[in-house]
Image (cartoon, rainbow, N blue to C red):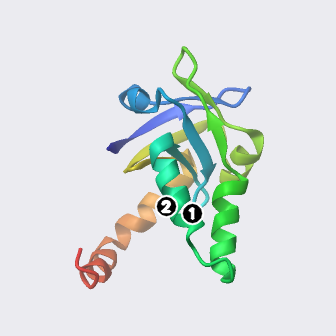
Amino acid sequence: MFIGEFQHNIDQKGRMAIPVKFRDELTNGAVVTRGIDKCLFIFTKSEWNALAEKISKLPLVQSNSRAFARLMFAGAIDVEIDKQGRVLVSDYLRKYAGLSKQVVVAGVFNRLEVWDKSSWQDYKMKTEKESGDIAEKLSELGV
């Protein structure tokens, strides 16, 4: 399980360190793809395969299903962690998420999310302000 929030830098070559706490989970490689809310998602291979299986079963005739599949699959890349614990984040993914030098890597249960530091701070501030409303809506779903 991935939990916690860590600040890191992306170097000029697009390499980003994976927090030490998460490296063991990603030793067999990982998949980086476009996330939702203008961040990147990093999945272990097994979590990626489970998600891919679910997406592949979505109805092809529904435009939202096709759009979501394109978002997840067309932008995805396989990555390996180097000896310094870094992964190479491709240019198009960095642009998609608006990543500058400083990023936040957030553990979100079955995935990591990579956010531009200022975007993360804005998102977090907004979400914290709305936490009561969010909790109320989730209670309707039994959470």
* Position of the C terminus by quadrant: bottom left
Image quarter of residue 61 = bottom right
Secondary structure found at label 1:
loop
Residue at 43% from the left image edge and 45% from the top image edge = 106
Q: Decide: marks 2, 1 in contact (CB < 8 A)?
A: yes
**What residue type is disc 1 on?**
Asp
The amino acid marked with disc number 2 is: Tyr
Q: Which residue is mark 2?
A: 123
Which residue is more in the foreground, 5 or 45?
Answer: 45
Between discs 2 and 1, the one toward the N terminus: 1
The 10 Å Cα crowd at callout 2, few under 14, some 14 to 19, many 20 or more, is few
Element assignment for label 2: helix
> Which of the 4 image quarters holds residue 88?
top right
Where residue 41 appears, as percent x and y from the top left, is 54, 50
Q: Residue at x 54, y 37 (%)?
A: 30
Disc ID at residue 37? 1
Image location (x, y in percent) of residue 91: 76, 40
